[in-house]
Image (cartoon, rainbow, N blue to C red):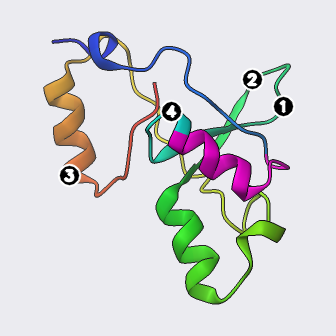
């Protein structure tokens, strides 16, 4: 099975100025725990990701009000990205993710 067989081709995304409530609502609506962060909706240039865990650890656990925050870096967004090739197998990808302790993989 190739990565292209299981990947989300047009995932929901947000920008750094999207408030965290909107990000969380996107995650609920699309049943996902990670949302790509793009520079702007016009260019759709990927600049980071935000996870439900990021929202919890970097806001709620630190006593911050997530309703007053956005998906910006370094407050919440994660910017270390690893890009993969579409031609690799899903098995290779899962091994790579596990080996490096990654939360996800962007194609």
Q: Which mark is residue 30?
A: 4
Rendering quarter of residue 94: top left
Looking at the image, is 75 positioned above or below residue 34?
Answer: below
**Please, what secondary structure does the residue beneath circle 2 have?**
loop
* Distance between the alpha carbons at the discs numbered 4 and 1: 20 Å
Q: Earlier in the sequence, mark 3 or mark 4?
A: 4
* Distance between the alpha carbons at the discs numbered 3 and 4: 28 Å
| Residue picked out by circle 3 | 99
Q: Which mark is residue 40?
A: 1
* Distance between the alpha carbons at the discs numbered 1 and 2: 6 Å
Q: Earlier in the sequence, mark 1 or mark 3?
A: 1
Q: Earlier in the sequence, mark 2 or mark 4?
A: 4
Q: Earlier in the sequence, mark 2 or mark 3?
A: 2
Of tags 2 and 4, the one toward the viewer is: 4
CB of mark 2 within 8 Å of CB of mark 4? no
Residue 35 in view: no
Residue range of the region highlighted in magenta in the rendering? 16-28
Q: Which mark is residue 19?
A: none
- Residue drawn at (83%, 70%), measured in percent from left and top? 68
Whole-percent x, y for residue 66 in the image: 72, 70
The residue closer to the viewer here, 28 or 47, is 28
Would residue 92 appear left or right of 17 to someone viewing this image? left
CB of mark 2 within 8 Å of CB of mark 3? no
Would residue 57 appear left or right of 21 to someone viewing this image? left
CB of mark 1 within 8 Å of CB of mark 2? yes
* Distance between the alpha carbons at the discs numbered 2 and 4: 18 Å
């Amino acid at each position: 099975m190739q990565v292209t067989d299981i990947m989300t081709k047009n995932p929901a995304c947000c920008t750094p100025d999207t408030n965290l409530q909107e990000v969380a609502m996107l995650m609920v609506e699309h049943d996902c725990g990670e949302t790509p962060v793009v520079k702007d909706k016009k260019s759709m240039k990927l600049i980071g990701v935000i996870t439900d865990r990021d929202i919890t650890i970097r806001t709620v656990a630190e006593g911050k009000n997530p309703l007053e925050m956005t998906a910006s870096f370094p407050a919440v967004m994660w910017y270390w990205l690893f890009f993969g090739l579409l031609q690799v197998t899903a098995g290779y990808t899962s091994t790579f993710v596990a080996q490096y302790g990654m939360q996800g993989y962007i194609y």
